[in-house]
Structure formats: structure tokens, C-alpha cells
Amino acid sequence: MRIELTNIAKRYKLEWVLRNLNLNLSTDKAYAITGPNGSGKSTLLKILSGHLTPTKGKIEFSLENKSLASDEVYRHLSYAAPYIDLIEEFTLIEALQFHQNFKNFIKNQQATDIIQILGFERAKNKPIRHFSSGMKQRLKLALAICSDTNLLLLDEPTATLDRQGIEWYQSLIREFVSKERLTIVASNVDEDFFFCEEKVNILDFKK
């Protein structure tokens, strides 16, 4: 996967959140989008995912050296963020099986394998609405990181996680994130993007 952003800008009403953003992102690196809360990191991830259209500029996607339409990008990405909700009426096993209707898990994993990775064997038949915030965050991360996708977007991945959860997240990254995926992490917490080779400071694109 390759993404090229040219003179990207985004405005909400009269406020410019991003301006003059030029980036080339490709699978040979993992990228950290850094900056304080409210600086536009999530806005950039939403643009990269195709959920938001930039006010100005051009964004081009390509996969295996072939152009990819922006409305097709969702087929090739997985995304975990605090503002993306789970279907809380599902039990854990139902949520994982439902997810498989749209995205396969990496390394031929099945729903039962993901439950083991999560360490939630006793909760497999428990409705997600009864999960703690930390359990829900782990599930969001597992669904994104363990999906067989070319583009992985993570927004504040360790939000609501305790120390044990952070260590679990980092082990998940080590096992399932490789150079074959374009991975982008938006955060101002070093532990979230410990594996990223390149940092992009969102404050550089506010003027």
C-alpha cells in the first residue's frame, strides 16, 4: 500500500485543522502521527481511511503499483480508534465471527484463536456491553491488528489500557505488524508508537 498526500488541508467551519500537508507513506516504514490532543491527528487518520474528504489538496492510493480508488480503500484497511464503536449486543464470539464476514484474520487465525490471544476464554459468550473499557479496547485492537489488511490505522491504541494491557498491545504489534503492511499510529504517547521508524508532527501542518 502507498498513500501520497499533496497539499492536503482540512477546515471545519472557519478553522483550518490541517494545511499544506505533503506526505508519501509506504509499507517500508511504520509511521507515528504525533501532536497534542486536539491538534488534528484523528482528522488526518480519518482522511487516510477515506472517512473524511480534505477541503483542499489531493490524496492518491495505490496497491501493488496499481491505483486504488478512495472509495475502495476500506476493503484494504483495518482501523482501531476510541470513536469507532463495537456492536455491543453481540457476544465476543459473535463479534469475531461477524467480523470475519468482512475481513479475514491474519495467519489463518480463527475466532477461537483471537479469543486466546485476547485471553478472554471465559468471556466468549458474554455480551460486549458488559465488558470493561479496557476489555473493549483490547477487542478493538485485536480486530484491527489481527485482520489481514494492507493498511493498519491505530488512533491512541493504549487509551484505557492498564500496564498489563499496554504490554499485551506491544506484544501484539511485535507478532502481527510487519513491513508488508503500511501501519500508521496517531498518538502523543511513546509506548503507542515504539515500533515506528518515522514521526510526523501534526503541528508542522497547522499554519
Image: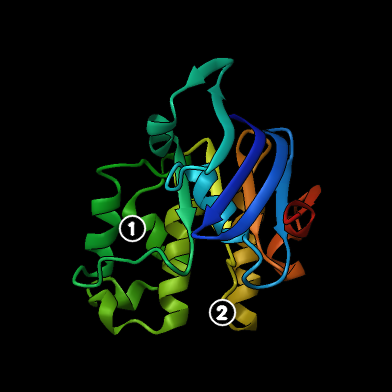
Q: Position of residue 200 (x, y in %)?
A: 77, 51
* Amino acid at circle 2: Leu
Q: Position of residue 39 (x, y in %)?
A: 66, 66
In this view of the protein, which residue sits in the foreground, 205 or 102?
205
Local crowd size for mark 2, using a 10 Å CA cut-off: few (<14), some (14–19), many (≥20): some
**Which quarter of the image is occupied by the N terminus?**
top right
Q: Residue furthest left?
A: 89
Across the whole image, how many numbered discs are drawn on residues? 2
Q: Which residue is mark 1?
A: 112
State whether residue 119 appears in this view.
Answer: no
Q: Is residue 20 left or right of residue 56?
A: right
In the figure, 67 relative to 100: above or below?
Answer: above
Q: Position of residue 97 (x, y in %)?
A: 25, 53
Q: Residue shown at 54%/46% (left/top)?
A: 152
In the figure, 80 relative to 162: above or below?
Answer: above
Q: Residue shown at 74%/39% (left/top)?
A: 29
Q: Residue shown at 29%/51% (left/top)?
A: 99
Q: Position of residue 126 (x, y in %)?
A: 24, 77
Local crowd size for mark 1, using a 10 Å CA cut-off: few (<14), some (14–19), many (≥20): some
Q: Which residue is mark 2?
A: 161
Query: How far is disc 1 from disc 2 in space, using C-alphas?
Result: 23 Å
Mark sitting earlier along the chain (1/2): 1
Q: Mark 1 or 2, which is nearer the eye?
A: 2
Residue 21 occupies which quadrant of the picture? top right
**Which quarter of the image is occupied by the C terminus?**
bottom right
Q: Is residue 195 left or right of residue 39?
A: right
Residue 38 occupies which quadrant of the picture? bottom right
Q: Residue shown at 28%/75% (left/top)?
A: 128
State whether residue 161 appears in this view.
Answer: yes
* Amino acid at circle 1: Thr
Q: Secondary structure at mark 1?
A: helix
